[in-house]
Image: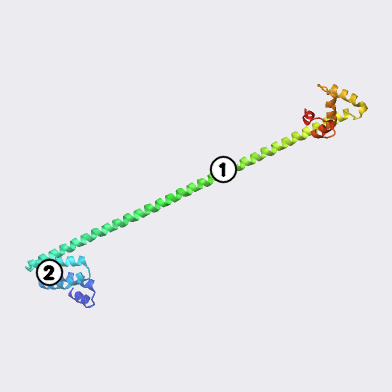
Amino acid sequence: SLKAYNYFKDIKATNFQISAGLALSEALQTNRQLKASQDIIEEILPLALSNGLLEEAANIYKIRSNISEQLGQSSKALSSYKSFLAIKDSLNLQAQLNTSLVLENEYQSARRENEIALLKAEDQILKLELQQRRTTILILVFVLAITLALGTYIYVNQRKKSKLRSDLLTSEINELRLQIKQLIDYRPEQSSIAIDQLNKALNNPLSDREFEVLQLALTDKNNGEIAEVLFVSTNTVKY
């Protein structure tokens, strides 16, 4: 142990020197070489303190207190023991602080994880709401397209029916005109015969004036033109 201690001392390996010194001090105490053990302790104590090795320093102070007590150095033994307690209290406080820091770090880490989870949940909710809006818009567009298509179909169908009715009415009117023209040959000498034949075919016989209006209407004249020819009002021609 002495050789190891001197070796580490020569190469200035402080930590190893302190460990070797503690082992050597313990061996010397076992051999009742208390003064030599105390000298080693006194040599390694400043090394531990200057390098901030508080655990080793506390252990050294405790050993120093025991040796001093055995050597009858009560004052030194007491001060060494107080230093031991002071370092232990400091180490315990530091341990508590470290524990508090660890707990604080764990709390902050858990808090950040919760915040991240909350942000992810909110983001997922926003995505779902956006998807729902898109789906609603697509449904509305589809319904609108169907409504427009149906409305267009109904409009076109009504126009076709209306045109068909108009064409049918025009055809009936043309057919009626043709029948009337066939009935009336426009020869003045036979006009009385024609009106008699026409009145026989009607439930309400026509007057001479009405017959004149009918003859002019068959020439494709409008109501105004017929009114000018007959010197009557347009309302008279209509009714």
Res 213 → quadrant: top right
Whether label 1 touches label 2, CB < 8 Å: no
Q: Which residue is mark 2?
A: 29
Q: Quadrant of the N terminus?
A: bottom left
The kind of residue tagged 2 is: Gln
Question: Label 1's element?
Answer: helix
Q: Which residue is mark 1?
A: 140
Give the image location of residue 220, x and y in percent.
83, 35
Res 166 → quadrant: top right
Q: Earlier in the sequence, mark 1 or mark 2?
A: 2
Measured along the vertical axis of the image, is residue 13 above or below residue 101?
Answer: below
Q: Is residue 108 visible?
A: yes
Question: Label 2's element?
Answer: helix
Left or right: residue 57 compared with residue 74: right
Q: How is the image coloured?
A: rainbow
- Residue at 84 percent of width and 26 percent of height: 209
Left or right: residue 105 compared with residue 87: right
